[in-house]
Image (cartoon, rainbow, N blue to C red):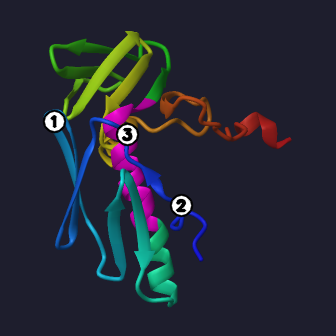
Amino acid sequence: MSRIGKMPIEIPAGVDVTIADDTVTVKKGNQSLTQSISPLVKVTVNDGVLTVERLQDDRFGRSMHGLTRSLINNMIIGLEQGFSKNIEITGVGYNAAKEGSTLVLNVGYSHQVRIDEPEGITFDVPANNKITVRGYDKQLVGETAAKIRAVRLPDAYKGKGIKYEGEILRLKVGKTGAK
């Protein structure tokens, strides 16, 4: 039995979960998230508790059991609390600024890199070398943070570039270190 899949999900007050044929929709206020579910699992809601059961006991059925439960749980947590990713910019002259709903990055190119906020995502720039990506969809928050990081990946020798907060970089030794 999947340890993650068999755990029930408590549905908080104010959050509405509806299950149609093969989709689960979670709503809170005017925000909603939708996830399609595999035909190998069955999702039920009873008295404010959501449970996920698998219909097949093969390897793929077991993996879909835990995955489906995690995706639904992330939707509920996202609408209740939200998700955020912190990004750091390292390098002389490298900085970030926010103009309206656009993130402007100066990261060593001959031009500024502009990234617009996707729907449901907000950028926050508390300092010129820190960016916070916030939203209620965990997958979209992670994808947007990865796109920002991909603008200038950290350098292997000095560590200059854009990285996640707390990310550990293994720096290479330069030419003089080979003696």
Instruction: Assess whether residue 7 is covered by the magenta stretch.
Output: no
Q: In this orientation, does residue 130 appear? A: yes
Q: Which residues are magenta?
A: 67-85
Residue picked out by circle 1: 119
Q: CA distance from mark 3 to mark 2?
A: 16 Å
- Binning the other alpha carbons within 10 Å of mark 3 as few (below 14), some (14 to 19) or many (20 upward) gives few
Disc sitting over residue 12 in the figure = 3
Residue picked out by circle 2: 7
Kindly identify the amino acid type of the residue bearing the numbered disc 2: Met
Q: Counting residues from the N terminus, which is met first, the one under dot 2 or under dot 1?
A: 2
Q: CA distance from mark 1 to mark 3?
A: 24 Å
Q: Residue furthest front?
A: 47
Kindly identify the amino acid type of the residue bearing the numbered disc 1: Glu
Q: Is residue 27 placed above or below 98 in the rendered structure?
A: below
Secondary structure at badge 2 equals loop
Disc sitting over residue 103 in the figure = none
Write the residue at 24% across / 22% down: 103
Percent x, y for residue 12?
A: 37, 39
Q: Is residue 19 placed above or below 134 in the rendered structure?
A: below
- Binning the other alpha carbons within 10 Å of mark 1 as few (below 14), some (14 to 19) or many (20 upward) gives few
Instruction: Assess whether residue 68 is covered by the magenta stretch.
Output: yes
Secondary structure at badge 3 equals loop
Kindly identify the amino acid type of the residue bearing the numbered disc 3: Pro
Q: Residue furthest top?
A: 127
Secondary structure at badge 1 equals loop
